[in-house]
Each structure stands twice: as structure tokens, then as C-alpha cells.
Amino acid sequence: MVGNKELQNEIRKIMDHKDVKYVLAYKKGTYGFQTTPFFVSKREEVSQVIFSPFCLNNLTMYIKNEYAKEKIGIVVKGCDSRSLIQMINEKRIPRDRLFIIGVSCGGVIDPKKRSKRISEPLENVDVVEKDDKFVFTVNGKKQEIPKREIVFDKCIHCEYPTPLIYDFLVGDKIEPLGKEDYCDVKDFEKNSLTDKWKFWEQQFDKCIRCYACRNVCPVCYCEKCMAEQLDPQWLRRSVNISENTVWHIIRAFHLAGRCTSCGECERACPMDIPLMLLNKKVEKDIKELFDYNAGKELDSKPLLAIFKPDDPEEDIK
Amino acid sequence: MIIDKNKINAFINQIISDHIVFAPVKNKDMVLFKQIKKPDEMTLDYNNSRIPPKSIYLPQTETLFRFSKNQNINLETPKKDGRTLLFGIRPCDAKSLKILDQVFTGEYKDSLYLSRRKNSILIGLTCHNPSLNCFCTSVNSSPADTDGLDVLLTDIGDKYYVELITSRGGKIVKNFPGFKPANKEDKKKKEEIVKKAKDSIKRHIKSERLASILDSIFENKYWEEIARKCLGCGICTFLCPTCHCFDMQDETAGDKGARIRVWDSCMYPEYTMQASGYNPRPYQMNRIRNRVFHKFNYLPKNNQVFGCVGCGRCITECPVNIDIIEVVNQAREVKKDE
Amino acid sequence: MNNPYKPWLAIIENITDEVGGERAIKTFILKFKDKNIQETFSFKPGQCIMVSLFGVGECMFAIASSPTEKEYVEVSVMRHGKVTSALHEAKIGDTLGVRGPYGNSFNVDDWIGKNMVFIGGGIGQAPLRSVIHYIMANRKKYDRIDVIYGARSSKDLCFKEELFELEKRNDINVHLSIDKEEHGWGHFVGFVPDNLLEISPSPENTIAVTCGPPIMIKFVIENLLKLGFSPDQIFTTLEMRMKCGIGKCGRCNIDNVYVCKDGPVFSYEQLKSIKGER
Amino acid sequence: MSKEFEPNIVAFLCNWCSYAGADLAGTSRIQYPPNVKIIRVMCSGRVNPVFVLNALQQGVDGVIIGGCHPGECHYETGNYLARRRVTVLKKLLEYIGIDPRRVQMAWISASEGAKFADVIKTATDEIRNLGPIKKIKRRNEW
């Protein structure tokens, strides 16, 4: 478990550098179990910084819109560090403009799963990690819940609990929590075309096209998104199954070889659309077809801008 | 009046026969207002719907008129819906519809919205178990507010306490034999439940003199601070029961087409972007400030109501914990403009 | 209740090329298909109409013709975005949609007996033209009239012929300008606000109406104040992106006013108290 | 149905090989089904997946993308890049429940008029069997 004091100390060290604009971290949210992104720009604010299993935001999302010349400090979990690698590879931000504080993360708590177990109080809450359990203290009452039952799905299969890139690491290196076996994707693939469509039709029918999935995504940063393009207008603004489906196909496709499975799109979605089931499918395919992993190592080239002459071509006539 | 819980289904069956009935329907972890054909499709065990019922009167996508582009251009207004009934709406959402009514009437009447509203009966359900982020009591409302409703039901155990608010509501109740007069005991029970609900609301906006306080801090850096972590995703506006902004677009296929409107959000940069490329609200700061001012300054000034009913949806669903209660309460502490 | 979003059909009666090039301006004469509507359609100078091209979209334009002209309405359109580009491709005889009139207007009745100064720049002359035509049709009711108008170059002047015609009359004073020196240009060279200072109209019993690019308006107002005009003697128009035109769709608010229905005309006195981005 | 369903097919053909192949099929008077409408693009690599999806939305029953044989692209790598894209897109379509056979890719050189006709013929038969597109087609009911 990451000590807040240690984390705060690292942030203070970063802030000693002259050309640091701010450090992206977490602080306690406005109520209950909430935490919130925190732009630390003054030394006296550092004491508010925390890290806990409630710190679910992928802070690298804020870097995508950052064009400042100064340096930025950022706190990343294992999964978030992959987004950062991807952004550095895509030349969105140079590595040397970043001070990266890695935090080892034993899994973050999924608010949807949590709300079914513990109702959220206004304040007086605490959580600590104890082996493979979380111990919640709510108004003085303690409750233990096994991690696997309450963390995000992505955490159950997390192969990178320790960040892959960092300047400072807070907390000890952690062994992988699980292995990504794509069991959900594989199960879904077994369905007939009709059943697959039936499922996705129901999901996409809910979509209200707020584009939160896009805005929250660290690697969705086109200056003009095709969804907003008016001339030619590929996507109509009307919300119906045809436009919604195309939006989700395009979104998943544009993230092929770029999505690092941080799960923010699915978390942000106000209509509970299982977007990770889509993202994971693409991730699995490109791993199988092209032996490609997004955001794993620096200096890898973008998936769709490279090729091998012997890439698989089973269906081509 | 009262109605036994086991008679509710019969009542719903009766109203389904001559109304299009919308009611809360469970969809996995959320509840949405959907048209129901049978009473057992609905659920009354819910806090509030994810999407506010404004979507019934101001659908996310709506045809304004159709056109055909042969030699002679023809324009045609879409057909009106029939009589509708909304069952199980929460008092906060009913109040929001009254706020929207003010927007869509006035000098130019929006016939599409208003005809839907006019032909719709609202049967409300007292909010006996408000959520953590509910704050209706801060914005001149309460869990059993009757404003905007035709009938209000309150769950008092094995029956509902029934309040008739309008004559329309009275008529629909009169037509069903299951309603019986309430006794003192029922009334007392109802009052207890409402009081308990009110007391369980823990979060509050300090709304006194809010409009003038906001006027004095328009230029403050505070808004930049708030906007910094905003994604600009627009969830708060789409899920807001009083947000009504829309975009208008033409769609065509061959020589036929339509002008449609779709929900839009002031949180998007495109919203105010002019054809020349100039954008009067270029930063998220401008947009988030506009949203807060619209709710707590512009609408109070123009229509003498808050543009907020305290449903808490924007707080609960915000992916980055931008909390309107805190935004407003902290705004009071901010240093005034010169 | 009528559907407020459904326009009336109108025919393009005539098209005049005002300005060429990238930021081309054309003036369209529109006539309603339905005779009754043409006869009953009334508006005040400064008001706007929504013009639709079916399948493309809608745009709000200030009416450029005078309310005294009952046979048609005119709009001048600068090529900018999707709708205006499509409009520039339209031909005489084409059918389009018109709804309105929307917004407030110049209070021409309140100005009876006063001197009028009109200060326009580029396409901003369109709403001013409506007032000028109206006032010329009711010439006796008003005192001295000055029209100060300028554009980037002589090629960019809108309503050129008309202005040259007006110039010849002695019941109106037209002062034209272009930004940069040109061969054969006999009038003022320089920006419109400078031309205003050059002419220095007296604020005594005078109303100043200005419309044009935001930056021009800013300096015109500054100079008017320098000349001794008080804020309630200065009128201008505001611009925002619009969709519905009737105060429902939300986007055109500045502070608590909707430009589409509460504007576009504001006195400088009013503008001073409106905060918010524009 | 009294008449058999005839599919509407759009073929995006690259300027240098496939389009020339189609041209050759025509000048050689090789018969191929009239269901196909050809859109010439400079390279198969120009085909944005959005083109394909938009065609399907507009009610096209199948899309064919024709490029130069691997190693023969006029721009050297365009067809290789297209190959990756189309492969990923087809997998994704199948996962959503849209028959991947509605999107097909073929390598056709300028000299392969007969192959062009053959590709069109097989694809037309295949797509005819799949029936009209329903799943992501725009309804255009206002």
C-alpha cells in the first residue's frame, strides 16, 4: 500500500524544480468514497494529496490537452503508465517534459460493484488493503471484502500493477495480480452473429452520444473528431441505432493498437455500455494477428502505420 | 385518498387502455422511463431514473418537419402523439418540467413540446428514500413536492396515500374504483414518511442571494480552477432534467429529408463556434461558468426559478467529481470582482 | 399552435453580386410563395430572418431591405460556412425557407426629430441599410443624416452603386472609406473609426448606430464617447451562433439575454451592464 | 418475393491496378454482374473504414476494396496498410454481429481483367445469399 506521506514527499521534490507547471495527483473528493483529480501547483497544497484504492481516474487524460512548455508532474498507476507510454510514442508529449511518479496499485475499487455491497455515506470513510482484502471503515464500522469481488474487472486481470515507466516509484513493486486471458471476449465470440447483434443493439440503443467515452480517453485527442465533422458529415447527429453503432465501431477502430485498457471509457459511460468488451476484442485480435501490444514499451511504432509483408490475409482474394 | 398496493396493477391496466403509459423500467443497474404495455414491466423500487423524463417531452432526437425536394418543395409537420401518462415520476423531475414549460412557452410557443405536455398526465411518487446527492430541499422543493404533478402517491406500507392535485388527476382517479378515502392514520403516516425523507437529505446548497453573489464573481479565477478537471463530456447536461439546449440539423436521403433537433450541450466547444471559426466561449472555463450561471443566475433573473431541481444526477454521474453543491457553496467564499 | 420551426417557402427573385473573392457577398431578393404571407409579413428595421436551404441548414440574417418595401425582403450574405456557401451556389428561381421576423429592432420611432449617424463596416451595413432606407422613405421626420461606411478595399464595399447614388443627394451625407490607398479613390483612406473622428459629427440631439466587425464596433464606440456621445445615444447589434432563433435552443445567450429574441439591437448603455463572452 | 434479391455493391478500386483491371475486363468484354458500382480511389490505402461503414449505413449490401498485389503498390506500402485496417475492421464487424463477408478485399492487377470479373461474380453471389443489409442501415424515417 502506498503511503501518502511518501507520495507527498516525492511531489515536493518535483516542485523544487523550477520549470514545473503543476503536478497531477489525487485528493479526497467532495463526498463519500469519492476522490478527484488534483492539479497541485502550490507547495502548501501538497498535503492534500492522497492515493487510495478509490483513485480511479486515469490522470494521463489531462496530458492530452496540455500544450504548455513547462514540465508536468503526474501520478500514475500501472495501467495509467501504459497510456503515458502510448502518448509518448505517438509524440503527443515528449518524455522529458514529464516527471512521472509511479504508484504500485493493488487494484482500484469499482463504484458499481461497491455500491451493491456498501451504501455510500457522506463522510467518515476509510479503506485499507489487507492482503487480498479491502477493509472498509464506514462511520466506525469495519467490513472486509475480498479484492476480487470489488475491484474493476481490468484489475482482476491486471498484468502491470507496477508502472512500466516512472521517475520515482512509491510503494513496492507488486507481482502481477492476474493474467489477461480475454475470457469474456472469447465467450462472447462463441455467440452467433444474430445473438451478437442482439446484444450490441441493446447496448448501443442506450447510447446518448455524449462522447464521454471519447473525452475521458487519454489517447482520443484528434483536434477535430470525425463525429463532429460537418462537411462531409460522416455521422449524423441524430441518436439512433445506425449512427450509434457506427460511432462505437469507429471509436473502437481508432483505438486499435492505441487503447491500453485503462477502462476509463466504460467507467465514464453514463449509460453503462460495456465498452471494454469492445476494446478488449480489438486488443486480443491485434495481439494474435500482429503480435502487437499498445503502450508496453517506448519507441514502438503505431500499429496501423506499420506492416509486415507476411501479415495474415486469410480472407483476401 | 388511498389505494391498496395490490390494486396498482389493475389501475395501470386501466390507464394503459386509453393512454400511452411511461413508467420506470429496470435496465440492469439503472432505471429508465419507458413505455410499458403491462404493469409488471415497471419497477417502483427505485431512486430515480438515469435519464430524466424530460426525454419524453423533449426527445433526444426529434423531427421538426419533413421536406421533399422534388420540383415542388413540400413541408410537413410530424403527427402528434396521443394521450400519455407518466407514472412514478419523482417530484424533482415534475418540477423540472414546469421550468421547461416556461422556456418553451413565451412569445414563441414550441408547439411540439407543448402539445406533448398538454396531453400528458403526471402521477408522481414521493421520494421516500432520497439518494446521497439529492438536495431538492435547497432549491425550493421537497421529496413530496406536488408542483407540476396531477396526482402524488406516497408509499405508506401496504398502500399508497393519494393526493389529487389537479382536476385532470381527480378524473383519472375517479374512473378507477380501487381508490378509497384516507383516514387520519394514513395521513399521519404519510406525513411521518415525508418528514423522514426530508430529514434524510444531508446535502444542501446555500441558495440565499445566490444570483447576486454569482454576479459579483463572474471574472474570478475560481471558474478556471473548477473547469481544470472538467472533461467537457456533457453528461451533466444530458442527464440534467432542466437542460433543454438543442442543435438543429438537416438529414436527407434522396429527395426526401427532415430537419431534426437533437440534444446539445453548452459544455461542447462546437456549441457556440461560429462559422468564421470565432468562438465566444473558447475555454472550458467559459462553458462551465455559463452552465452554473444559467442555473443559478440567468434563470432566477429571467424566470424567477432556479434552473436546478436538486436531483443530484450531475454529481453522481460526473466522471471527475465536479460537484455542483460544492461549486456553488465554495463560490460564496470567493473574493468579489473589483 | 403553429410549428415555430417550419419556415414559409420563398423564391429567390434576384441575386446581386456585391463583393467577389474568398469572402464573397451576395444580396438575395426573396419573395414568399404564398401571396398572403408576403402581404402580411411585416418587420421593423434591425430585425432578422432565418433562411433555410432544405437539406443543408438554416442561418440567421439581418433583413437588409426597408419595411416600407412590401414586395420582397432582402438579405446580404457573406460566404462563410456550410449554409452560406450553399446559398451562394443558389440560382434565381430556387425555393428556400424563411421564418421570422425575429429579434428586437432599431427604435426608429423614438428617433424622430433627431440627427442620425450610421457607422458601418463591411457586411455590417446590411441592417443599417434597412434603417437608412426606412428613414429616407420618411425623410421629413428626421433631421441631418450621415452615413459613414468603409471596407477593406473598394472591391469590398457592399451596396456600392446605391451608396454612390445616395452620395449625389443633398438630403443625406455619405462618407465612404477604404483601409488602404488605391488608385483613383477620391474618398477617405483609413479605418472607419478614424473616418468617424475626421467627420466628427456633433452629439447634440444625435443618435449613432453602428454595425460591423466586432473590432471596428469597439473602436467606433470608443471614438463616439470621445466625441461626447453618451452611452444611451449609441446603438449597435450583437452576433452569436444561433439555431432556433426563438430563444429555446440556448446557445446565443450573453449573460441572461438571448441575442436571437432579446437582441440583436442593444444600446451601449445596455451593453455595459451585460457581462459575459461575446 | 417474386423477384430474387439483387444486392447493391460498392467497390473501391485503386487507380493503378484494380481500376485498370476493371477497365480491362470491360474492354475485353468479360461479363460480370451489374450489381457493382465502382468508386476509384488513388490507392486501397486511401479507403478509410468510415467510407465502408458509411456505405453500409446508406444501404449498400456489400463493399469490395481492390488493391494492387502485395509488393506492387504504386505507393509501395498503401495496400499493406489497407490490409491491416481491413483485417481489423472485419473482425470488429463480425464481433458486433455484422457478417464480415459484406466487406471483402481483393488484389487485382491491371492485367487481371478476368480475375476482376471473377471477384465481382463470387462476391455478388455471396452477398446475394446474405440478403439485404439491415443491421446498420439508416432507416431514414422521420
Image (cartoon, grey):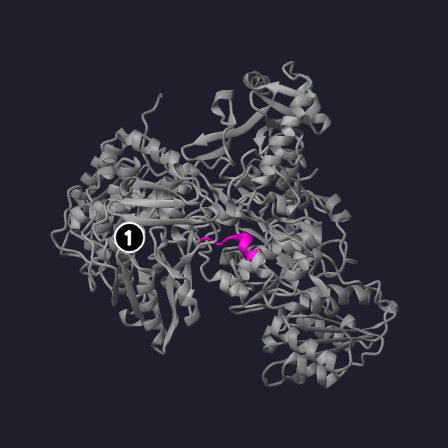
Q: Nearer the viewer, residue B2 or A157?
A: B2
Does residue C235 lie above or below A2 as drawn?
A: below
Q: Chain of mark 1?
A: A
Question: Residue at left 27%, top 41%?
Answer: A148
The image shows residue B268 at horizontal and vertical percentages of 49, 55
Give SS at disc 1.
Answer: loop
**Number of numbered labels in the structure image:** 1
Residue at the extreme left:
A310
Residue A3 appears in the figure: yes
Does residue D89 lie above or below A229 as drawn?
A: above
Other residues around mark 1 within 10 Å, as few (<14) / some (14–19) / many (≥20): many
In the picture of the structure, the residue carrying the numbered disc 1 is A259
In magenta segment, residue B12: no
Name the amino acid, label 1: Cys
Residue D137 appears in the figure: no
Q: Which residues are magenta?
A: B321-328
- Which quadrant would residue D138 be assigned to in this image? top left
The image shows residue B101 at horizontal and vertical percentages of 67, 41
- Which quadrant would residue A146 be assigned to in this image? top left
The image shows residue C260 at horizontal and vertical percentages of 66, 56
Relative side of A305 to C174, left or right: left
